[in-house]
Image (spheres, rainbow, N blue to C red):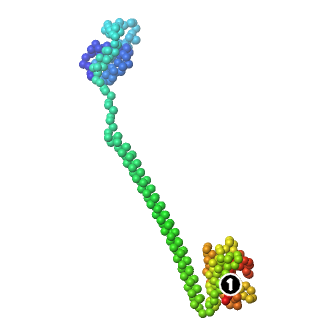
């Protein structure tokens, strides 16, 4: 609040300020009031500043104005030195500190809502991908199972097809006039071994079926024509993992008067003459 005229209280505060006798709180309050543009207080302070400044520049001592002496004595005698400044400051407009601004609902809850929404989306995405991963794994497992079943079925069909062809050839030979059969029995190295030679005498062809122990590594079974002149190789006999074999062999025209057939175990690649042991042997009838 601006003052209209200088009062004793205003003159007192201005004089004390010029002398540096105000407390820190009183001086700050008076300076704030001056910055608000009170011409009366500013004039009083300027007048007292001039007086204080001239005191140091004067050649001869200056007589202190009576009212300043009275003001100083009155201030010293007072019990509450800050009452005048406090009364002075009551006339000044209060400038309360601005109340803290209350955050809006949007500022308070929107970040939390956004974080919760992102967390929910992340959880749903994780759940979806996890479910998708489990479904893909289950589908892959079913596919692998179907592929294994398909492969097993294909193998079985191939085996059935091969057996059908074998049976077809066996029936063809057995129905051919003049066909002969040589049954080979297992020998001491393999008592459970067995074989049969179906001999198509018109086409001079042997169809050989055998059930033999799986050969050791580096060994192979070999079939022999046994004649009065000696033994002639009829070829190698390859077995499946179970030891079963089905082989078609053409009988050379040079081989005459076959008396028997024999199967031996030979080094890989076969031998020129049979070596011991003989695994199966049968006479031609």
In the depicted view, which residue is nearer to us: 42 or 179? 179
Q: Residue at x 74, y 89 (%)?
A: 228
Residue 61: quadrant of the picture: top left
Q: Is residue 169 above or below residue 189?
A: below
Q: Is residue 95 above or below residue 215?
A: above
Position of 137 with respect to 116 (left or right) is right
In the depicted view, which residue is nearer to us: 3 or 151? 151
Q: Residue furthest right?
A: 229
In the depicted view, which residue is nearer to us: 64 or 186? 186
Q: How many marks?
A: 1
Q: Residue furthest left?
A: 4
Residue 278: quadrant of the picture: bottom right
Q: Residue at x 61, y 77 (%)?
A: 244
Q: Residue at x 73, y 85 (%)?
A: 231
Position of 73 with respect to 276 (left or right) is left
Q: Position of residue 236 (x, y in %)?
A: 67, 80
The residue singled out by tag 1 in the image is: 282
Secondary structure type for disc 1: strand
Q: Is residue 24 above or below residue 223?
A: above
Mark 1 neighbour class, 10 Å CA radius: few under 14, some 14 to 19, many 20 or more:
many
In the depicted view, which residue is nearer to us: 141 or 274? 274
Q: Residue furthest bottom?
A: 177
Position of 192 with respect to 158 (left or right) is right
Q: Is residue 47 visible?
A: no
Q: Position of residue 152 (x, y in %)?
A: 53, 72
Quadrant placement of the N terminus: top left
Q: Position of residue 240 (x, y in %)?
A: 61, 75
Quadrant placement of the C terminus: bottom right
Q: Position of residue 151 (x, y in %)?
A: 52, 71
């Amino acid at each position: 609040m601006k003052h209209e005229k200088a009062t004793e209280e205003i003159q007192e505060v201005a004089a004390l300020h010029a002398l540096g006798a105000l407390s820190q709180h009183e001086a700050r309050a008076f300076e704030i009031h001056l910055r608000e543009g009170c011409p009366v207080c500013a004039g009083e302070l300027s007048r007292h500043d001039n007086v204080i400044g001239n005191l140091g520049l004067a050649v001869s001592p200056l007589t202190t104005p009576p009212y300043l002496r009275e003001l100083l004595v009155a201030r010293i005698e007072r019990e509450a030195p800050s009452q005048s400044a406090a009364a002075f400051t009551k006339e000044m407009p209060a400038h309360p500190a601005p109340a803290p601004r209350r955050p809006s609902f949007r500022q308070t809850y929107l970040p939390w809502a956004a974080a919760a929404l992102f967390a929910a989306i992340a959880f749903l995405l994780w759940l979806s991908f996890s479910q998708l991963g489990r479904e893909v794994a289950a589908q892959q497992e079913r596919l692998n199972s179907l592929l294994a079943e398909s492969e097993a079925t294909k193998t079985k069909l191939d085996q059935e097809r091969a057996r059908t062809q074998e049976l077809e050839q066996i029936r063809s030979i057995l129905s051919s006039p003049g066909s002969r059969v040589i049954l080979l029995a297992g020998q001491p190295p393999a008592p459970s071994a067995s074989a049969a030679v179906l001999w198509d005498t018109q086409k001079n062809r042997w169809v050989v079926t055998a059930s033999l122990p799986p050969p050791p590594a580096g060994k192979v079974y070999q079939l022999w024509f046994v004649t009065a002149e000696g033994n002639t190789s009829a070829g190698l006999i390859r077995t499946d993992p179970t030891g079963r074999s089905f082989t078609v062999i053409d009988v050379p025209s040079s081989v005459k008067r076959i008396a028997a057939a024999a199967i031996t175990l030979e080094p890989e690649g076969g031998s020129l003459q049979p070596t011991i042991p003989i695994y199966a042997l049968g006479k031609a009838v």
